Image (cartoon, rainbow, N blue to C red):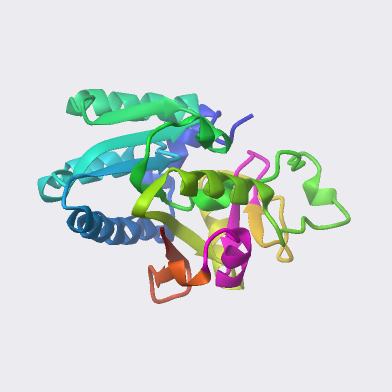
Amino acid sequence: MNMYDNPDTVAHSFDENYLSPYLIQAQWAEFVSLKKVIYELSQRFQRPIRILDIGVGSGRIIQNLHDIPEIWQFIGHYTGTDNADLCLELASKMVNDLDINDKVTLLNLDAVALHQLTGMYDLIICTWFTPGNFYPDDFDFENYSRATSKLDLTINVKFTSIFSQAYSLLAPQGEIVLGACYKDNEATRLKQEFSYQKMGMTIITSPQDSFTATQERFWSQRFTKEKLYAYLPFIAPHQISFEDLDTYDYAMQVRIKK
């Protein structure tokens, strides 16, 4: 089961009445930074750029970009992937309503299958804490709260596989942008738990975990710079940069250059 297969969960996830102020403001902080990246890359390539969005969700990023013509003009084509039918239904309706099917392609594709794509992209994005959603396939949501040992995330095979595939789809001089990503600290953990509880979910993890998970199968990891370096061994550290998205150590955006 996908974490976005439940209609109520999907509705709450995209309804600001159920979102914490930290989540809402992280959305806008990452979007402001993303606009700058898009402009920068369009100037670097001297043409509108090709974007791949891993985990397009409701299509929020597409709509926000479309609503700013001065930025939308710098996008040649936008491809969004997701493996949640309910999210793709929302995104498809938005794309149809805006009449931008000529510029936007939506694909039902799990992130672990990015190798099936044949195009090259100037910018690959994975936004609003989605980089932290790639949990092990055998994670036991039903029994984890009673487990005697904690999940060791020294490595995250799925995360590394997904972004290795993404990197292979990146054009020379292109970039991958990850984030917002949760920072791994106690204050952020508590904010994560509050956010999920505000959506009506039940927490199954403890303070010893570097991720927060719920009975409703939400799972989101927190990161340190060191952990991201370890998860991306195929990228030289000097090609990875980090930007704080706030002043209270909650979220960061990661830029990976090729």
- Quadrant in the picture for residue 40: bottom left
Q: How many marks?
A: 0
Answer left or right for 145 relative to 173. right
Q: Residue furthest bottom?
A: 247
- For the question of whether residue 197 can be seen, the reply is no
Q: Residue furthest left?
A: 70
Q: Residue furthest front?
A: 172
The answer to if 99 sits in the magenta stretch is no
Residue under the image location 55 percent in, 58 percent down: 192
The stretch of residues the image draws in magenta is: 213-236
- Picture layout, residue 28 above or below residue 251: above
Return the x and y of residue 177 as percentages of the image width and height: 40, 56
- Quadrant in the picture for residue 99: top left
Return the x and y of residue 109 as percentages of the image width and height: 50, 29
Return the x and y of residue 56 as percentages of the image width and height: 40, 38
Residue under the image location 65 percent in, 49 percent down: 213
- For the question of whether residue 23 can be seen, the reply is yes
Q: Name the one closer to the observer, 107 or 92.
A: 107
Answer left or right for 38 relative to 71. right
Residue under the image location 11 percent in, 45 percent down: 69
Q: Name the one closer to the observer, 85 or 51.
A: 51
Q: Name the one closer to the observer, 191 or 57.
A: 57
Answer left or right for 137 relative to 174. right
Residue under the image location 39 percent in, 41 percent down: 53
The answer to if 226 sits in the magenta stretch is yes
Return the x and y of residue 248 as percentages of the image width and height: 44, 75
Quarter occupied by the N terminus:
top right
Q: Name the one closer to the observer, 255 or 66.
A: 255
Quarter occupied by the C terminus:
bottom left
- Picture layout, residue 54 above or below residue 229: above
